[in-house]
Image (cartoon, grey):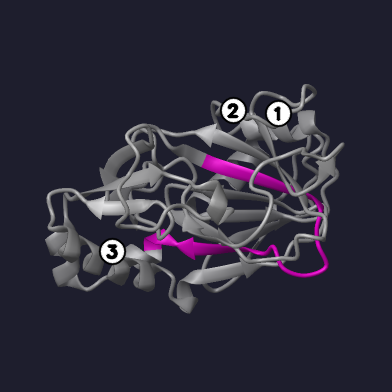
Amino acid sequence: MATATVDIRPLSSAIGVEVRDVDLSRPLSDETFGTIRRAWEENCVILFRGQRLEQEEQVRFAERFGTLSELKNATRKKDLHPAVLLVSNVRENGELIGELPDGEMTFHSDQCYVERPAMATMLYAIEIPPSGGNTCFSNGFRAYETLPADLKTRLEGRLAVQAYDYDGSRGSSPRLRGEALKPDVRQYAHPIFRTHPPTGRRALYVNRMQTQYIVGMDRDESNAVLDTLFDHQERAEFVYEHVWTPGDLIVWDNRSCNHARTDFSPSERRLLRRVTVLGEKPY
């Protein structure tokens, strides 16, 4: 067991912390993990650099956060744990070995379109292109806290429909908001302002990629309000952009932040290993 004083430092002025001198390939003591978890819950994003993790070691660490979300994907490799997803554009024998291979992805929250979205997402960098493919994180706590009071009052108790509606012709991008959702699309209405159970804080819980409309609001009015919310939560002072290095492991809290991916060359190999942790129904 690894038990030691944990060196935790701010990652940026916007969001996140970095934990130094912790080897995640070794089991952590309850005391050490408790310190790490509290720092993550309070700061939305936590980074560990210089890790050397096999799949089993990453899964073991992820299980400390809660029940893992098992996946069903067309490109699943037989040797992958049921909760592991490869995020990659690498091909073997002409076939992709992972999901979400190429291109820019706008801000979103993982699995927000189901009743119990992912609480945590853990991403471990294995192969990284020389430029691009960065991950940006937006602080939902600060976005909520800085909203104008009249907008908070207007939207208190309101729900917004989140949907997973992708069209392969658009690569990694979903259908444009305003287009009719297909009847079989996964979708769920969640609070625009959700409570973060560990801290009791409120977070702005909408995102440009998957939030479709505000329930009970005229569509034009809904679009205008959502555009205002998206622009607000993506302000530079709320965002940290992470430039990946192999061996980086990041855990982010989908209950309190959104994330996005910058574009990169499809000719450059990119391979990361993802595990997600099941969350509670937002309230």
Identify residue for label 2: 71
Q: Earlier in the sequence, mark 1 or mark 3?
A: 1
Q: Earlier in the sequence, mark 3 or mark 2?
A: 2
Task: Give how far across and how far down residue 83 sits, in percent.
Answer: 64, 28
In the shown orientation, is residue 27 left or right of residue 162?
Answer: right
Residue that appears at 59% across and 40% down:
34
Q: Quadrant of residue 137?
A: bottom right
Dot 2 amino acid type:
Leu
Dot 1 amino acid type:
Arg
* Residue 16 is one of the magenta-drawn residues: no
Task: Give how far across and how far down residue 62 sits, in percent.
Answer: 64, 34
Identify residue for label 3: 226
Q: Quadrant of residue 274?
A: top right
Residue that appears at 14% across and 70% down:
150
- Label 1 or label 3, whichever lies nearer to me, is 1
Observer able to see residue 282: no
Task: Give how far across and how far down residue 224 sits, in percent.
Answer: 23, 69
* Residue 126 is one of the magenta-drawn residues: yes
| Residue 76 tag number | 1
Residue that appears at 13% across and 55% down:
217
Dot 3 amino acid type:
Leu
Please say if 140 is above or below 63: below
Q: Looking at the image, do the residues carrying marks 2 and 1 touch, with CB atoms under 8 Å apart? A: yes
Q: Earlier in the sequence, mark 2 or mark 1?
A: 2
**Distance of mark 1 from mark 3, alpha carbons?**
35 Å
